[in-house]
Image (cartoon, rainbow, N blue to C red):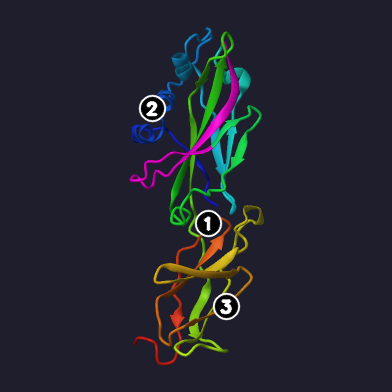
Amino acid sequence: MPPSASVGLRRPELNALLLTLPLAAALLFAVSLWQSGQTSAQEVQTPSQVFWSSSPPTVSITLHAHGPTVNWAYDVMSQTPTGWELVGFHLYRWVPSQPDVLTFTEIASNLSVTTSSYQDSMGSATDEQRTGGTVFEYYVIPVFERLSDRVSQIGTTGAARFTVPALPKPNNLTLNFGWGLSGPHTRPMRMSWSHPHLAWDSASGFDRVTEYQLFQNGRYRFAVSGTNTALDFEAERCERGFQIRVRYGVFYSELADPADQRSGCRRW
């Protein structure tokens, strides 16, 4: 599986976030994106100083078929600005590989100070984004309260990213005529295959197929269990445009084209 990577935060990300968050929250978060790497032994008096005096969480990603787990480490004793108390974390997600999509998605908010990991089920991500090659970037934001008056403020943001792996398609995929009853203008079709080669660590969840999905001309038709090696459906005798893809948890393979073995329907 591809390792996650820690990332620096850049001005395009700042601009994108300002477009999607409420103004007050965006302004606060924007300042936190500028990491100075400075610390101070003196008490931090103002909220703006928290941006420069706090240090970011160390963030990494563990990829699983049911969604990536965002992990972070934060040493409360050494990383919390003097005069402030760490009270929790916020978690955001962005897709930097699609620069036209300028939405930062809030994954979780007000996570406790003892929380150090969170699995993203990716319910808000599109199918296309959950296909091989998409880059996801996650931001872990510490939240502080000032001891003197309990004013809240966010600190410097930690970030990491991962790339959705190119997941294997089914092998030996063929389309042929099936057997059984059919309508007056249709006849049975059978798509058959052998399972993809899954040389994955079982702990990743990518060592098994969740389901196989049938598409026609880019539109979803139906799915069968990942234990199947064939699916039957009705269509006109030489109808075309059939494809199949594999779902692994919340991720997908690319669409695969079958070898058309229907007698009298192949294009030579």
SS state under label 3: strand
Alpha carbon of mark 3 to alpha carbon of mark 2: how far? 53 Å
Residue 261 in the image, given as x and y percentages of width and height: 46, 86
Identify residue type, mark 2.
Leu
Read off the residue under disc 2.
23
**Whole-Å distance between the Cαs marked 1 and 3?**
21 Å
Q: Is residue 91 magenta?
A: yes
> What residue is drawn where x is 37% and y is 41%?
102
Residue 28: % across, % down:
43, 23
In magenta segment, residue 67:
no
Q: Is residue 220 above or below residue 232?
A: above
In front: 248, or 1? 248
Q: Residues within 10 Å of mark 3 (few under 14, many from 20)?
A: some
Please report the residue visible at 39 percent of the width from the left and 87 percent of the height from the top. 266
In depth, the one of 2 and 35 nearer the eye is: 35
Residue tagged 1: 251
Q: Residue at x 40, y 86 (%)?
A: 238
User: Which amino acid type corresponds to the residue marked 3 in the rendered image?
Assistant: Ala
Q: What's the residue at 37%, 47% (across, down)? A: 98
Q: Considering the numbered disc 2 on the image, is that residue within a helix, a strand or a loop?
A: helix
Q: Earlier in the sequence, mark 3 or mark 2?
A: 2
Q: Residues within 10 Å of mark 1 (few under 14, many from 20)?
A: many
Residue 246 vs 171, above or below: the answer is: above
Q: Quadrant of the C terminus?
A: bottom left
Q: Nearer the viewer, mark 2 or mark 1?
A: 2
Q: Which residue is mark 3?
A: 230
Segment tinted magenta in the rendering: 83-107
